[in-house]
Image (cartoon, rainbow, N blue to C red):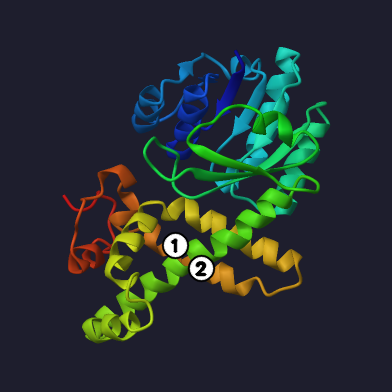
Amino acid sequence: MVTIGLVGAGAMGSALGASWREGGAEIVTCLAGRSARTRELAARAGLTMVPALEDVLRADIVVSVVPPADAVAVARLIADAAGRARVQPLVADLNAVAPSTVRDAADVLRKAGIDLVDGSVSGLPPATGRRPTRVYLSGERAGELAAIASPWTSVTVLDGEAGQASALKMCTASMYKGTNALVMQAMLTADANGVLDAFLADVATMWPDRVPSWHLDIALAATKSGRFADEMAEIARTQADAGLPAELFNGVAAAFGWAARSRLGHTPPEELPLSPSVAEVLAGFAPGDSPWPA
C-alpha cells in the first residue's frame, strides 16, 4: 500500500486525502496545534493521525496543501524535519502560489536532498458524486504522484519543469476568483447606491444563466477570502514576473482582504445556509468577527 503524508489537512487537503484513500492509499497527517474544525475534517476523511511531522515524512510521497503565504515556510519545516528523521521523501507542492514561489520552495528542499513535484488544484474539494476536481502536475517526477489512484480527481501531467502547474493555476484562478471579486464589489456598490435591482437586470441580459447565482458565488468566496487574498498576491507576483502590472491583482487581494474582515469572512464554508437571499448575503459583508448568519 502506498502511503501519502499530508501536510495541511484543511478542507482541500482532507478532501484530496479522502480521494487518495478511496483509491487504496493510506494517508497520514499530524494535527498538532490544528483547530477543532481541521480535526473534524481529517476525521471525516479517514486520515491516520501521527504525532509529529517527522512521522508524516516517512511516507512514500509528502503533499503540502497549506495557505499560499505559508508555502515556503512549510518547505523549510519539511526540510528541517526530514533532516532530523534522516529521510528524503518526494514532496508535492499543491499550493496556490506563483511559479517563482515554487522555485523558492524547491531550492529549500533541494538543499535537503529532496525533490519537488509542482502541482495545482482547480475546482471544489473532491468528493463522491461531484464532477472530478482537476489536478495538474509538473516536474521530472510528477508521474509518481499521478500514478496513485484518486477516483474523485482528474489528473493531468503537464510538459515542462516544475512551475508549469502553478503557472496554470495562477491564470485560471485569476479568472475564476478574480471574477468573484469583481461581482462582489459591483453588487455591494450597486446596493450602496440603491441601484442593485437595475444592475442585476442589466447584467442578466449578458449572463442570464449566471446572474441568479452570483450572490451564492460571492458568499462562498467570502468564506475563503483570507486564503484568497494571499492567492491573489501570488497572482500579482506571477503577472509581474511576466512583465505585466501587479497593481490589478494587488487590488483584488485588497478586496478579498476586506471581505475576510466581514461576518462571511469568519464563517466556515460548510456552515453557509443553503438558499440565502441576495439581501441576506450582502448583509453578511458587514464587518464583524462572529459567523454569519447567526
- Give the answer, above or below, for where 149 lies relative to 170: above
Which of 133 and 242 lies nearest the eye of the viewer? Answer: 133
At label 1, the amino acid type is Phe
Q: Residues within 10 Å of mark 1 (few under 14, many from 20)?
A: many
Q: Are marks 1 and 2 in contact (CB under 8 Å)?
A: yes
Which of 15 and 151 lies nearest the eye of the viewer? Answer: 151
Q: Quadrant of residue 211?
A: bottom left
Residue under label 1, please give it: 256
Number of labels in the image equals: 2
Quadrant into which the N terminus falls: top right
Report helix, strand or loop for mark 2.
helix
Q: Quadrant of residue 265?
A: bottom left
- Give the answer, above or below, for where 142 lies relative to 102: above
- Identify the residue at image location x=68%, y=21%: 81
Report the disc number at residue 252: 2
Q: Position of residue 71 (x, y in %)?
A: 63, 42
Q: Quadrant of residue 82?
A: top right
- Identify the residue at image location x=67%, y=34%: 92
Report helix, strand or loop for mark 1.
helix
